[in-house]
């Protein structure tokens, strides 16, 4: 245990009576329940089971319980959980087994609810890439992507920020226009403005178990002058261990298509209104109109790796999106260069592993590094991969891309690696906050952080 003490710092304990609602008290409760979800922020931890969210700190602060509005008829459950943090605004995002994306305030109030696509939301992935980390054809990009088997959606961070700011301004001023709210509810079938987003089908090589938009990519050779933006996506799954796609925003549709998309729904709406006037009966239908997902934008397959019976299981991205660590069903970990789309490193013998990228001070070469007042900058940190091998009871830290193993840390059986979510609008200004990895021991409730420095 000495290696654990010297390479981690204990922050506090999350143990509380409220955790029994999530199964705490039973050995291995944190890692053995497939429906238990965790999301970490810098000072708070959110945990969820099928229908309950508990927000807790690691001190004596208040615990908050949120019970999302789920459909009992459809056996709807919470299937994904993540924090959304915009400067002073902090909320909880929820994905459900019916394909709904919901946002809750920390008071448990529903801020937003929207159908993304019918199907189980596997993951909500929050990402941002700064201009100084990107190449010339890219701009800064902040997003929330939603992963459903065979489908990926992208919400722009700026649009989410706007809807949250509007909601908090309305709430704080206590100004509610009941008539307009009721009218919106009747028109939309759910009372919330629809967040604009892109939706792509990525099932050409089979349904995915996980996926990620890794960044913006150049347009195809024949479309160099195109004004629309293209994204690169990587998916992993049962039929193809790794697949990659070019995702198009599909802004520049043909004029005929654009006209049809406006005229046909309007004409249909007029016809249905007239028919209702003609055939109006005494009994008015009580059933709400069914909410339908938007149509898919274009997704072009780039490559795929099939290696039966190997299956891709989990995927984690580096901060810049240029590297992805992928675990498979044969106990291997593949390090993928997401731009060249080649596997650059392979680890074997890591069944049920979990990986997270982190940044460490491997060597301090700066002139002022020896000074006690010296604040390390981004260039002082080295990108590493933390691999949690639960069957071995250890965490290993490897230097990227091809560097040595830097650390081996012993950890308890019921432990889980966690990482705070990306904070929208965060910058690379001093003092630089490196990408850190936290260790939660479910059986003891102890939360620790892996130290930034090897020394």
Image (cartoon, helix red, strand yellow):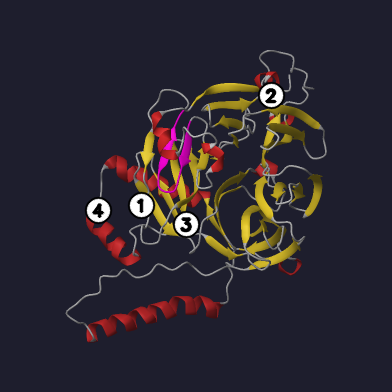
Q: Which label's residue is closer to the chain start, 1 or 2?
A: 1
Q: Which label's residue is closer to the chain start, 3 or 1?
A: 1
Q: Name the spot of residue 412 as percent of width and height, x first.
A: 62, 29
- Between the residue at mark 1 and the residue at mark 4, the CA separation in whole angstroms equals 23 Å
Write the residue at 31% across / 43% down: 171
Q: Name the spot of residue 448 as percent of width and height, x first.
A: 58, 26
Q: Examine the rendered structure and indicate whether residue 418 appears above or below residue 135.
A: above
Asked whether the beta carbons under mark 1 and mark 2 sit within 8 Å of each other, the answer is no
Which residue is labeled 1 in the image?
Answer: 69
Q: Which mark is residue 177?
A: 4
Q: Which residues are magenta?
A: 44-57
Tag nearer the camera, 3 or 4: 3
Residue 225 seen in the current view:
no
Tag nearer the camera, 1 or 2: 1
- Between the residue at mark 1 and the residue at mark 2, the CA separation in whole angstroms equals 45 Å
Write the residue at 39% across / 30% down: 17
Residue nearest the observer in this picture, 368 or 330? 330
Residue nearest the observer in this picture, 76 or 435? 76
Residue 401 seen in the current view:
yes
Q: Name the spot of residue 122 as percent of width and height, x first.
A: 55, 54
Tag nearer the camera, 1 or 4: 1
Q: Which label's residue is closer to the chain start, 3 or 4?
A: 3
Using residue 78 as the reference point, say whether residue 366 is left or right of it. Answer: right
Which residue is labeled 3 in the image?
Answer: 97
Using residue 57 as the reference point, say whether residue 182 is left or right of it. Answer: left
- Between the residue at mark 4 and the residue at mark 2, the CA separation in whole angstroms equals 51 Å
Residue nearest the observer in this picture, 402 or 32? 32
Please identify the quarter of the rendering in which residue 383 is found.
top right
Q: Which label's residue is closer to the chain start, 4 or 2?
A: 4
Does the stretch in magenta take in 393?
Answer: no
Which residue is labeled 2 in the image?
Answer: 376
The local crowd at label 2, few if under 14, some if 14 to 19, many if 20 or more residues have their Cα within 10 Å, is some
């Amino acid at each position: 245990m000495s290696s654990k003490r010297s390479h981690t710092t204990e922050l506090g304990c999350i143990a509380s009576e409220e955790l029994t609602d999530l199964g705490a008290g039973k050995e291995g409760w944190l890692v053995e329940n497939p429906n238990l979800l965790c999301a970490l922020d810098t000072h708070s931890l959110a945990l969820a089971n099928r229908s309950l969210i508990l927000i807790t700190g690691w001190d004596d602060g208040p615990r908050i319980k949120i019970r999302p509005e789920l459909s009992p008829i459809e056996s709807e459950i919470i299937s994904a959980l993540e924090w959304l943090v915009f400067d002073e605004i902090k909320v909880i995002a929820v994905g459900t087994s019916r394909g709904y994306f919901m946002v809750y305030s920390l008071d448990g109030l529903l801020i937003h609810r929207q159908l993304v696509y019918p199907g189980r939301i596997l993951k909500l992935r929050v990402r941002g890439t700064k201009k100084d980390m990107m190449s010339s054809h890219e701009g800064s990009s902040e997003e929330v992507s939603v992963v459903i088997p065979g489908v990926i959606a992208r919400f722009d961070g700026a649009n989410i920020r706007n809807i949250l700011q509007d909601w908090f301004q309305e709430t704080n001023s206590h100004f509610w226009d009941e008539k307009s709210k009721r009218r919106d509810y009747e028109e939309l079938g759910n009372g919330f403005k629809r967040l604009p987003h892109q939706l792509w089908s990525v099932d050409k090589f089979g349904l995915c178990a996980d996926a990620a938009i890794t960044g913006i990519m150049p347009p195809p050779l024949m479309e160099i002058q195109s004004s629309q933006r293209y994204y690169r996506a990587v998916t992993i799954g049962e039929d193809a261990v790794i697949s990659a796609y070019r995702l198009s925003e599909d802004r520049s549709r043909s004029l005929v298509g654009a006209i049809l998309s406006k005229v046909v729904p309007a004409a249909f709406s007029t016809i249905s209104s007239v028919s209702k006037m003609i055939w109006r009966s005494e009994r008015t239908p009580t059933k709400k109109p069914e909410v339908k997902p938007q149509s898919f934008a274009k997704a072009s397959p780039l490559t795929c790796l099939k290696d039966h019976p190997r299956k891709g299981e989990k995927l984690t991205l580096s901060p810049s999106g240029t590297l992805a660590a992928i675990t498979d069903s044969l106990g291997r970990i593949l390090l993928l260069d997401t731009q060249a789309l080649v596997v650059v490193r392979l680890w074997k013998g890591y069944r049920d592993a979990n990986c997270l990228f982190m940044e460490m001070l491997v060597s301090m070469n700066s002139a002022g590094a020896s000074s006690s007042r010296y604040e390390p900058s981004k260039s002082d940190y080295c990108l590493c991969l933390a691999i949690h091998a639960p069957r071995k009871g250890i965490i290993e830290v490897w230097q990227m891309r091809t560097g040595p193993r830097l650390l081996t840390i012993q950890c308890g059986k019921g432990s889980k690696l966690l990482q705070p979510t990306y904070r929208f609008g965060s910058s690379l200004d001093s003092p630089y906050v490196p990408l850190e990895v936290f260790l939660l021991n479910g059986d003891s409730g102890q939360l620790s952080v892996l130290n930034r420095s090897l020394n």
